Amino acid sequence: MFSLNSDYRYYLYAPPCDMRKSFDGLSGLVVNALGREPTDGSVYVFLNRRRTHLKLLHWESGGFVLYYKRLEKGCFSLPAKPSFTWADLVLMVEGIVVKRSIQQTRYSLIKS
């Protein structure tokens, strides 16, 4: 079941990734290149060189979940920054490129 939502933090692994990597290989990239702990509950996003394949690595209780999408036509656009939001991920996966947008400020409780 696809259980990702806006409660998670999303991080992009910026260099092109070898899509043959699975759980252990991608976890190693998170630790060594991003300096983060793959079991922290965040979602890590990986793209291949042509940006036609996307993998999401996420830790849920009990183990890793790996989501994989391959585009038959077109490519994924890169988010503006390495740490991005659920809305940015949805736009990227759906192939929507926003040229200009203004997001109104909203009240948010800071989670500690």
Image (cartoon, helix red, strand yellow):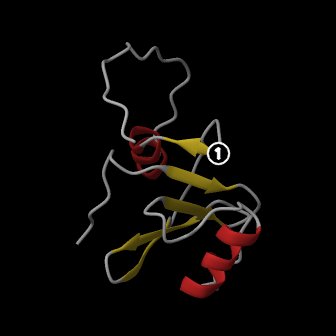
The residue wearing badge 1 is: 82
Q: Does residue 75 appear in this view?
A: no
Instruction: Name the quadrant of the C terminus.
Output: top left
Residue 79 is situated, as x and y percent measured from the top left of the image, at: 60, 41
Mark 1, other Cα within 10 Å: few <14 / some 14–19 / many ≥20: some
Q: Nearer the viewer, residue 71 or 78?
A: 78
Residue 9 is situated, as x and y percent measured from the top left of the image, at: 46, 49
Asked if 48 appears above or below 93 in the picture, the reply is below
Instruction: Name the quadrant of the N terminus.
Output: bottom left
Q: With 18 as the anchor, is 75 left or right in this view?
A: left
Q: Residue drawn 38% across and 14% down?
A: 105
Q: Residue drawn 75% across and 71% down?
A: 32
Q: Residue drawn 45% across and 47% down?
A: 89
Asked if 40 appears above or below 92 in the picture, the reply is below
Residue 87 is situated, as x and y percent measured from the top left of the image, at: 39, 39
Q: What amino acid type is highlighted by mark number 1?
A: Pro
Q: SS for tag 1?
A: loop
Question: Which residue occupies the extreme front position in the image?
Answer: 112
Residue 34 is situated, as x and y percent measured from the top left of the image, at: 71, 60
Q: Nearer the viewer, residue 45 or 110?
A: 110
Q: Residue drawn 37% across and 32% down?
A: 110
Q: Does residue 5 appear in this view?
A: yes
